[in-house]
Amino acid sequence: MSVDASLEVLGWIVPVVLSGLVGWLSRGLTRLHEAEKARDEAQEARDRAMQTGLRTLLRAELLDIYTRHVVRKKPIGVSIQDEAERVYRAYHELGGNGTGTWMHERIMSLDACRDEVGGAGQ
């Protein structure tokens, strides 16, 4: 085969090979992007579930304090009101509102008594 014929064959083969290589790389990048997107979506779902679970636990703590001190009228110490404030702030930052806010307002409106030693277990 002459040099001219070889160059002509290469002129046809090289674009075909390069085109196939570009297609293969493109498919690989697309798959990589899809896998990364799926991982991100799964992480976001886990984060939402964790946030919802934590918000639920914080609301339950507010409800417990509310029931003990507002409904049952058990005296409330300053440390319990401080705890209720910390719980409510975290609850609110996680998107909690509504009844949690309502309970918090009633807890904070109570007249707090001075805590006894070990008063946090009221």
Image: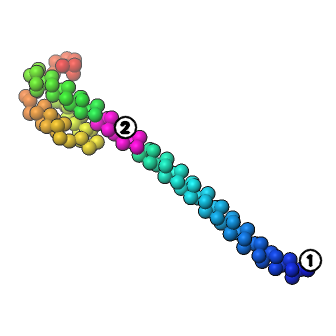
In this picture, is 115 found above or below 9?
Answer: above
Which residue in the protein does label 1 denote?
A: 1
Residue stretch in magenta: 45-55
Where is the N terminus found, in terms of image quarters? Answer: bottom right
Q: Say whether residue 47 is magenta.
A: yes
Give percent across and percent down for residue 25: 64, 61
Q: Residues within 10 Å of mark 1 (few under 14, many from 20)?
A: few
Q: Is residue 110 left or right of residue 52?
A: left
Return the mark for residue 50. 2
Q: Amino acid at mark 2?
A: Met
Q: Main secondary structure of the magenta part?
A: helix
Q: Position of residue 39 (x, y in %)?
A: 49, 47
Q: Can residue 80 be seen from the camera position used here? A: no
Horizontal side, residue 48 vs residue 105: left or right = right
Q: Position of residue 58 (x, y in %)?
A: 26, 33
Position above or below: 50 against 40: above
Q: Could you tell me which residue is drawn at 82 percent across and 76 percent down? A: 9
User: Type of residue at label 1?
Assistant: Met
At x 71%, y 69%, the residue is 18
Q: Which residue is located at x 72 percent, y 73 percent?
A: 15
Q: CA distance from mark 1 to mark 2?
A: 70 Å
Foreground residue, 15 or 108? Answer: 15
Q: Nearer the viewer, residue 4 or 78?
A: 4
Q: Is residue 96 visible?
A: yes
Q: Which quarter of the figure has residue 61?
A: top left
| Picture coordinates of residue 80, whole percent (x, y) | 18, 26
Query: Does label 1 or label 2 sit earlier along the sequence?
Result: 1
